[in-house]
Amino acid sequence: MALAIPGGGFGARYGDKPVVAAGLVLMLLGGIVMATSGPTSNATSGLWSMQLLGRVVAGTGGVLLNVAMSKMVADWFAGREIATAMGIFVNSWPVGVALGLLVHPMLAAHGGLLLVHTAVAAAIVAGLVALIALYPVPVAAVAGSAGSKGTWPRGIALAAVLTAGLVWGLYNAAIGVV
């Protein structure tokens, strides 16, 4: 929450695309810090403090990315099939984790941890290039951003939002435990 709430404000002020790009850059920088300070074939142990720094930087980028991309999906599918679009978007995270659990050990077996970091960095760079080159801002997002101010939900809507947040938090906790 300490990063997500300001991340939403950054999106409102600077636009979703620049915030997603910044999130990807932070994820890339954090990954580079972890790759260059971690154990390799020439070193037996990484510098723990640098590993933590890299993880915090990459995690900050991930939070910015998640907040802004959620808004981007909502903008693209406003008024039509938003439940399906959000369902696909939300499930991309655990699918990505599962894919990483399958692919990363194979990469590490063939080229070590540095190959895993390189593959992740390549995926981030590909995403950044695709975002910059291919992502058009939806017309509805531009038209709706002129002066619309959101309000906090009240009554039953607030209860529904809190319940959904609790379910989502417990779901993520369960994935973390697994």
Image (cartoon, grey):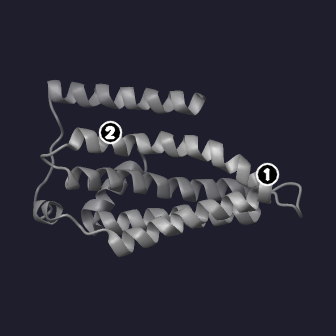
Instruction: Using the rendered view, name the quadrant where residue 28 is placed.
Output: bottom right
Instruction: Using the rendered view, name the quadrant where residue 131 is placed.
Output: bottom left
Depth check: give the residue in front, 123 or 42.
123
Kindly report which numbered mark, 1 or 2, lies closer to the viewer in this rendering.
1
Quadrant location of the C terminus in the rendered image: top right
Instruction: Locate residue 71 relative to residue 142 in the image: left or right.
Output: right
Instruction: Indicate which disc residue 109 carries.
Output: 1
- Percent of width and height locating residue 37: 75, 62
Please tell me how crowded label 1 is: few (under 14), some (14-19), or many (20+) other residues with Cα within 10 Å.
few
In the rendered image of this protein, does residue 117 appear above or below residue 167?
below
In the rendered image of this protein, does residue 168 appear above or below residue 35?
above
Q: Secondary structure at mark 1?
A: helix
Please tell me how crowded label 2 is: few (under 14), some (14-19), or many (20+) other residues with Cα within 10 Å.
few
Q: Secondary structure at mark 2?
A: helix
- Percent of width and height locating residue 156: 16, 24
Depth check: give the residue in front, 117 or 164.
117
Please state which amino acid type lies under the numbered disc 1: Ala
- Percent of width and height locating residue 172: 48, 33
Which badge, 1 or 2, comes first in the chain's sequence? Answer: 2
Instruction: Using the rendered view, name the quadrant where residue 58 is placed.
Output: bottom right
Q: Is residue 25 visible?
A: no
Instruction: Indicate which disc residue 87 carries.
Output: 2
CB within 8 Å, label 1 to label 2: no
Q: Is residue 94 visible?
A: yes
In the rendered image of this protein, does residue 62 appear above or below residue 136?
above
- Percent of width and height locating residue 127: 46, 65
Q: Residue at x 23, y 26 (%)?
A: 160
Q: Residue at x 20, y 50 (%)?
A: 77
Please state which amino acid type lies under the numbered disc 2: Gly
